[in-house]
Image (cartoon, rainbow, N blue to C red):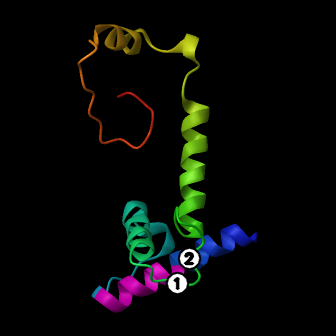
Amino acid sequence: MTGRASQFNDDLKKYIRFRNECDGTRLREEAVDFEEFMACLDVEHYLGLRRPDTWSEDGNETQVIVKTLIGQILTECTPARNDLPQVYLRFAELLKPDDLVLTFNYDTVLE
């Protein structure tokens, strides 16, 4: 197992143990809610609970790996400029200079 996969597995096992000790939830790895797991890592990073082992100011190693992989998947799945659906182009054409677009997405996909 590579170092990165090993770190991810270590973090996942710590999360499962944490949930069991804190609220008695007995989880199997395949039953872990991924967003809850990542949220727990976000809190751990924000509070600096791994100091001095914090991997980067952008997150702990597992966070950075997951963010990078999500970015890679989104990049690979985003259509090329000339293959954008017409509805995207029509939406952009309707925008005026003073219009604001508010999104709660972290990605670049227009839904």
Q: Is residue 92 above or below residue 52?
A: above
Q: In the drawing, what numbered circle is on residue 23? A: none
Q: In the drawing, what numbered circle is on residue 51? A: 1
Q: Is residue 68 above or below residue 57?
A: above
Q: Is residue 20 left or right of residue 5?
A: left
Residue at the spot 49% in from the left edge and 67% down from the top edge: 30
Q: Is residue 45 left or right of residue 74?
A: left
Q: Position of residue 51 (x, y in %)?
A: 52, 84
- Dot 2 surroundings within 10 Å: few (below 14), some, or many (20 or more)? some
The overriding secondary structure of the stretch rendered in magenta is: helix
Q: Quadrant of the C terminus?
A: top left
Q: Position of residue 82 (x, y in %)?
A: 57, 10
Near-viewer residue (13 or 57): 57
Q: Which residue is mark 2?
A: 54
- The quadrant in which residue 97 appears is top left
Q: Mark 2 and mark 1 in contact? Answer it, CB < 8 Å.
A: yes
Residue 15 colored in magenta in the image: yes
Span of residues in magenta: 13-22
Residue at the spot 36% in from the left edge and 66% down from the top edge: 36
Does dot 1 land on a helix, a strand or a loop? Answer: loop
